[in-house]
Image (cartoon, rainbow, N blue to C red):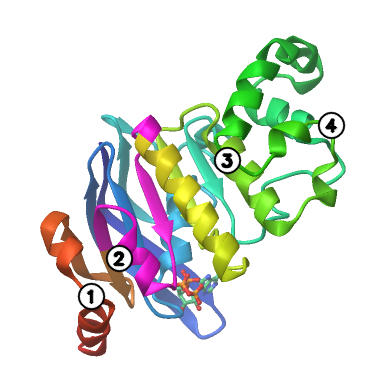
Amino acid sequence: MIELKKVVKKFNTIDGEKVIFDKLDLKVEEGEFISVVGGNGAGKSTFMNMLTGDLEIEEGEIIFDNNNIEKLNSFKRKRFISKVYQEPSKGTSSNMTVFENLSMADNKGKRFGLSLGLNKKRKSDYIEALKELELGLEEQLNTEVGLLSGGQRQAISLTMATLKTPKLLLLDEHTSALDPKTSKIIMEQTKNIVEKNKLTTIMITHNLKTALEYGNRLIMLDKGKIVLDIKGKEKETLTVECLLKKWGQF
Ligand SMILES: Nc1ncnc2c1ncn2[C@@H]1O[C@H](COP(=O)(O)OP(=O)(O)OP(=O)(O)O)[C@@H](O)[C@H]1O
């Protein structure tokens, strides 16, 4: 389980101190797939960056499986938290091949040069993982990732992020730069990978339909506050119109 207890996040700006989260509490159960929605400036990216350790918190606790991690730096958190970014180029190295990218992800936390050779043994595992994407990428192991389409790169990013079964998978608007058809393909792959590996997942999206269609819990943020938190049947029966109406109330 992941728990945020009374988390305070402030920024110092030229206009003075800006409090973004003021004693934020949140419990995330193992295996939950949470969609996070909210308007511009609601605090979604800040929330994710507090989890990854890219932003330090001023007060409070972040607990992963009974261990406080708020003092752990982002590099160490990468061992158990994976993130897929909005830009397909961000999760992969464009001048490296598909195989090299996957090897790199597989060796997270190890010395890369030493282990690349060893990972040839894992080639068949990579091929299996790529086959599941159904994009023919298993035939392109030696292709430089920079030559692939945005959708193919995002599929590789997703595979890289989940190769080692993270304790937490973060998806930061990971389909928003893709066309609708490709976005749907990547969302379906996301669902398959999350369900197959029972991954605890938090996904930021501006697409309310996507937020409702995927995952089993939905959180709406507004000015650093959780203003809506629904799951299970309640989420399943919610429509985009209802969600928009609720949104309008905040
Ligand atoms: N480094 C920073 N310094 C000062 N203020 C910041 C900083 N980063 C974010 N903020 C402020 O914190 C608030 C939350 O920003 P955040 O980027 O988390 O929102 P968001 O919900 O991700 O928005 P968007 O949907 O536009 O990406 C905003 O008011 C923003 O201006």
Q: Residue beneath label 4, please?
A: 142
Would you say the residues marked 4 and 2 are in contact, meaning their CB atoms lie under 8 Å apart? no
Residue 197 is situated, as x and y percent measured from the top left of the image, at: 39, 31
Q: CA distance from mark 1 to mark 4?
A: 44 Å
The disc, 2 or 1, on the residue closer to the chain's N-terminal end is 2
Would you say the residues marked 2 and 1 are in contact, meaning their CB atoms lie under 8 Å apart? yes
As helix, strand or loop, the secondary structure at mark 2 comes to helix
The disc, 3 or 2, on the residue closer to the chain's N-terminal end is 3
Nearest to the observer: residue 56 or residue 38: 38
Span of residues in magenta: 196-218
**Res 199 visible:** no
- Residue 212, label in figure: 2
Find out whether residue 198 is within the magenta segment: yes
Q: CA distance from mark 2 to mark 1?
A: 7 Å
Image point (54%, 51%), residue name: 54
The disc, 1 or 4, on the residue closer to the chain's N-terminal end is 4
Q: Residue beneath label 1, please?
A: 239
Quadrant in the rendering for residue 99:
top right
The disc, 4 or 3, on the residue closer to the chain's N-terminal end is 3
